[in-house]
Image (tube, rainbow, N blue to C red):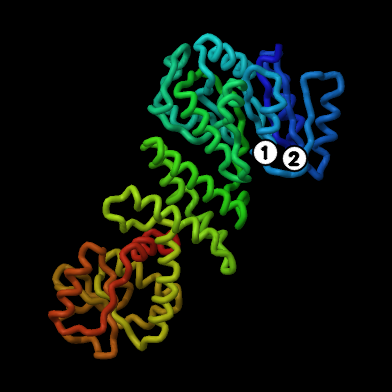
């Protein structure tokens, strides 16, 4: 009887695939099957697997044209003979030799369809599996946990799954090249409702440089996967998953997504707008703009602002504090420092006479020429008040610098 099938999609992984397969053979659980799916490799991966198959009946090699890791894993699930399945990437390997045996026994003893290992190793550093950080190492054995309490979406490679449960519930990987695995894990764990955890360190993960894994097409698929998770979380009232997914959109992947936008393709922009509609359908104010769109808008806002300042003879910066100073240094780095004639403040008392060697004047002194435009570089919560003050003092040429842009400039390492 095959207790566990290890499913390994392989695509041009000749450097690591031998170590990967050997780490499975080293497991103390011997009733295993290693299902390798060659996803159209053009290197020696298949030949190396065939070499390891000699005298080792537990290794199976399937071959297909390149269709992506999700489709490859689905084929592995269909062809697997094990009662349980686990997933391993060909450039990673298994660490603790007893881990699979512990996970198999935990599933059998607790009569559950899913088991997670508590720890894994990322580039040599052992950490807790995401969302399980709160669990103590001595409280995991023989306990069953509810998915609703955790709502995890990452690290499916740290789990063991009952194969018949996946097949009968039609729980497959979506046909994406990126973010296919979080979607799979969310659907499986939500359907299973509960899982068990063992105190083991199964997986060694060679964490890649994230930016190198994405270009236009994979960024589009990433966004589609994130949208799927966002909608699934909303439909099933998975509040923790919803917040996690939104955080991934706004912070984890925002820069990668924007970096891969191209002028002649609007797909990323359309998907970001779709996400914004989804988010605002849950937002009472209906006016929230997700961070990638804000950054995109600010990029254009920044270009327009610099172009406008280049066309002006002189400007003054209202606000001689941290934001004003940061904005002046930013202008100087863009060869526009000479446009700044002075800093303005409402009260000269308590302020320095100079900031970055630029004079500081009280706004009511009338020491700015009529052709000078005042740029308000104070925190957003003060800008309306400053605007009223400038009107009262007779200033006609002034602009409020976007508060988000000011803080991005101030936080930038370029000016630190």
Residue holding disc 1 = 71
Q: Is residue 82 left or right of residue 251?
A: right
Residue holding disc 2 = 39
Q: Position of residue 99 (x, y in %)?
A: 60, 18
**Can the viewer see residue 379?**
yes
Farthest residue toward the top? 109
What secondary structure is marked by label 2?
strand
Relative to 349, is 191 above or below? above
Please say if the residues under marks 1 and 2 sit with CB atoms less than 8 Å apart.
yes
In terms of image quadrants, where is residue 193? Answer: top left
Q: Position of residue 74 (x, y in %)?
A: 66, 33
Residue nearest the viewer, comparing 60 with 373: 60
Q: Nearer the viewer, mark 1 or mark 2?
A: 1
> Which residue is pictured at 29% across the width and 83% down the height?
373
Q: Give the mark, 1 or 2, whose residue is nearer the N terminus.
A: 2
Q: Is residue 197 left or right of residue 378?
A: right
């Amino acid at each position: 009887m095959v207790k566990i099938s290890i499913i390994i999609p392989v695509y041009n992984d000749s450097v690591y695939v031998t170590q990967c397969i050997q780490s499975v053979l080293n497991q103390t659980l011997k009733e295993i099957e290693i299902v390798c799916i060659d996803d159209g490799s053009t290197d020696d991966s298949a030949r190396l697997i065939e070499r390891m198959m000699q005298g080792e009946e537990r290794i199976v090699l399937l071959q297909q044209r390149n269709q992506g890791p999700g489709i490859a894993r689905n084929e592995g699930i269909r062809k697997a003979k094990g009662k349980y399945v686990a997933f391993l990437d060909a450039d990673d390997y298994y660490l603790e030799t007893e881990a699979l045996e512990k996970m198999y026994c935990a599933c059998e003893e607790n009569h559950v369809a899913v088991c997670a290992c508590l720890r894994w190793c990322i580039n040599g550093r052992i950490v807790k599996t995401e969302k399980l950080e709160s669990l103590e190492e001595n409280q995991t054995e023989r306990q069953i946990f509810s998915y609703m309490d955790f709502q995890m979406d990452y690290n499916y490679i740290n789990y063991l799954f009952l194969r018949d449960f996946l097949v009968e519930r039609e729980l497959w990987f979506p046909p994406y090249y990126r973010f296919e695995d979080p979607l799979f894990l969310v659907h499986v764990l939500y359907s299973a409702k509960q899982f068990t955890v063992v105190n083991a360190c199964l997986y060694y993960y060679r964490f890649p440089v994230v930016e190198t894994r994405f270009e236009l097409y994979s960024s589009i698929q990433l966004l589609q996967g994130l949208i799927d998770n966002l909608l699934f979380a909303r439909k099933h009232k998975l509040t923790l998953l919803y917040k996690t997914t939104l955080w991934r959109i706004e912070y984890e992947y925002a820069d990668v997504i924007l970096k891969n936008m191209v002028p002649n393709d609007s797909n990323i922009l359309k998907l970001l707008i779709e996400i914004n509609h989804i988010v605002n359908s849950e937002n009472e104010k209906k006016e929230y703009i997700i961070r990638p769109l804000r950054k995109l808008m600010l990029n254009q806002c920044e270009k327009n602002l610099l172009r406008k300042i280049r066309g002006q003879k002189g400007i003054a910066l209202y606000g001689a504090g941290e934001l004003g100073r940061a904005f002046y240094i930013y202008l100087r780095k863009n060869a526009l420092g000479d446009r700044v004639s002075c800093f303005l403040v409402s009260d000269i008392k308590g302020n320095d006479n100079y900031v970055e060697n630029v004079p500081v004047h009280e706004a009511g002194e009338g020491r700015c020429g009529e052709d000078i435009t005042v740029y308000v570089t104070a925190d957003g919560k003060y800008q309306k008040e400053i605007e009223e003050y400038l009107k009262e003092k007779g200033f006609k040429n002034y602009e409020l610098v976007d508060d988000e842009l000011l803080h991005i400039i101030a936080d930038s390492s370029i000016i630190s």
